[in-house]
Image: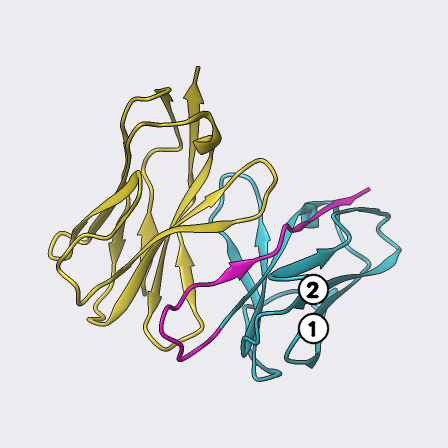
Amino acid sequence: ETGVTQTPRHLVMGMTNKKSLKCEQHLGHNAMYWYKQSAKKPLELMFVYNFKEQTENNSVPSRFSPECPNSSHLFLHLHTLQPEDSALYLCASSQVGGQSGEAFFGQGTRLTVV
Amino acid sequence: AQTVTQSQPEMSVQEAETVTLSCTYDTSENNYYLFWYKQPPSRQMILVIRQEAYKQQNATENRFSVNFQKAAKSFSLKISDSQLGDTAMYFCAWQRVGTYKYIFGTGTRLKVLA
């Protein structure tokens, strides 16, 4: 597979559940991102990992916990979420310091918290 | 702080016609990229076109072209000969060269009518 792959595509979870979102990139990039996309809002950057080190955490509630075991994989662990956390979660990767600056996105996970 | 503004939440265009999506941004930086991303109903965001701020020449990719006005901080996207497959959300984005941080606008939903 090429590009950025996210699983699952859809997830419905109760407020007391624990689940994880997975992202994998096959592009050899050195940076990976989690974004939250809600209707009529700009994409909200949640976390950035650059060379596996977390370089950004945009005041994200602790019920969201990222994990980056290596430069190709990124997880978002979810626990005790709220209904307002329902959104599309996008993973992206890019090559920081590369020539194009382009970010490549996965297809997203549509999360519904009930 | 950098901001990106897309003032048109929704637009429509007849098939084969031309449409222009507007984007303005605010930055004190001098070396940056600007992007237009397309997000079709399948949800995967893909790059449409990219502009380096130091280049005066407007970028062009087939039916897509930009009007980059650096002094006015304006970066509009023109789609010529619109096709039904152009129906999507379009996001304008800004990035300082060599960094991992992107700033996205709120998007413009474009519908191409048969």
Q: Position of residue B106 (x, y in %)?
A: 43, 44
Give the residue type at disc 1: His
| In the foreground, B49 or A109 | B49
Q: Position of residue B89 (x, y in %)?
A: 47, 38
Would you name the residue on which mark 2 appears?
A23
Alpha carbon separation for disc pair 1 and 2 = 6 Å
Q: Residue furthest top?
A: B114
Chain ID for yellow: B
**Image quadrant assignment for residue A66:** bottom right
Q: Position of residue B61 (x, y in %)?
A: 31, 47
In the rendered image, residues at marks 1 and 2 fall on the same chain? yes
Mark 1 lies on a secondary structure that is: strand
Q: Which region is colored magenta? A: A95-114
Mark 2 lies on a secondary structure that is: strand
- The structure residue drawn at horizontal position 27% and vertical position 27%, both measured from the top left corner, is B18
Q: State if disc 2 and disc 1 touch (CB < 8 Å).
A: yes
- The structure residue drawn at horizontal position 17% and vertical position 64%, both measured from the top left corner, is B55
Q: Is residue B22 left or right of residue A24?
A: left
**Image quadrant assignment for residue B43:** top right
Q: Is residue A80 magenta?
A: no
